[in-house]
Amino acid sequence: MTKHLYFICPTDFLETAINNAFKGENYFVTSLGNSISLDTDEVEEIHALIETKQIRCITFVLSDDNQIVLDAVNNQNFCDLRGMSSLYDDIEREKTSVKSLWQESSLVVPILSHHLNAKRKELKAKLSHWLIDDIAMNTKIYRRQSGVFNEFHTDLCRLDFACSN
C-alpha cells in the first residue's frame, strides 16, 4: 500500500478529492496557501512522520482557486495575518516576473506552480541529509472545474530559466 504525505491548504478542502483520486494511506500537513515554515523543528517533525509511517512520496498541492493565493495575487486583504507576509512577498515577486510571459488573466497557475515547486525544493534540500532512501516529491494543482490534478514544472514556463542560444 502506497504511503503518501500531502501538503495542502485547509481553505481548499482537498482531502476527499485526494483520497478519491490517489488510493493508499494518505497523510496531510496543512498550512494557509502552503506557506509552511520549514524551520528546523518543523522539518524534524516531518522527518519523524516520514520514518514512522514509512512514507515514500510527498506532494505539495493547491487548487487553482486557492483563496489565499488569489488574494495575494489580487487584493492582498490577508497580508497582515501572522506569518503570511513572506508568502505574499514571494507571490508579489513572482507575479512581477510572470507578467512578461503570461496574460494578466492567467497568472495564477504559473504562480501556484512556482510557489509549490519552491516549497518542494526547499523541503527536499532540508530532508536530504536525514533520508537514506530517496523519496519521490512532486507538485500538483487541482483544477476544481474538471476535478483533475495536474502536475506542473515551473522551470519549463519561466523565462529566467531559458537559454537563448
Image (spheres, rainbow, N blue to C red):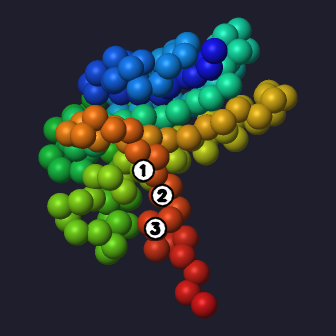
Seen from the viewer's position, the closer of residues 56 and 84 is 56
Q: Are marks 1 and 2 in contact (CB under 8 Å)?
A: yes
Mark 1 to mark 2 CA distance (whole Å):
5 Å
Query: Who's the residue at 55% across and 22% down the image?
Result: 5
Q: Secondary structure at mark 1?
A: helix
Q: Which residue is mark 3?
A: 158
Q: Are marks 3 and 2 in contact (CB under 8 Å)?
A: yes
Q: Which residue is mark 1?
A: 113
Mark 3 to mark 2 CA distance (whole Å):
6 Å
Q: Which residue is mark 2?
A: 154
Mark 1 to mark 3 CA distance (whole Å):
11 Å
Query: Who's the residue at 71% across and 9% down the image?
Result: 52
| Number of other residues with Cα within 10 Å of mark 1, as a class: few under 14, some 14 to 19, many 20 or more | many
Quadrant location of the C terminus in the rendered image = bottom right
| Number of other residues with Cα within 10 Å of mark 2, as a class: few under 14, some 14 to 19, many 20 or more | some
Q: Is residue 148 above or below residue 19?
A: below
- Per the rendering, the mark at residue 79 is none
| Disc 1 residue type (three-letter) | Ser
Q: Position of residue 153 (x, y in %)?
A: 50, 55
Q: Secondary structure at mark 2?
A: helix
Q: Position of residue 79 (x, y in %)?
A: 26, 38
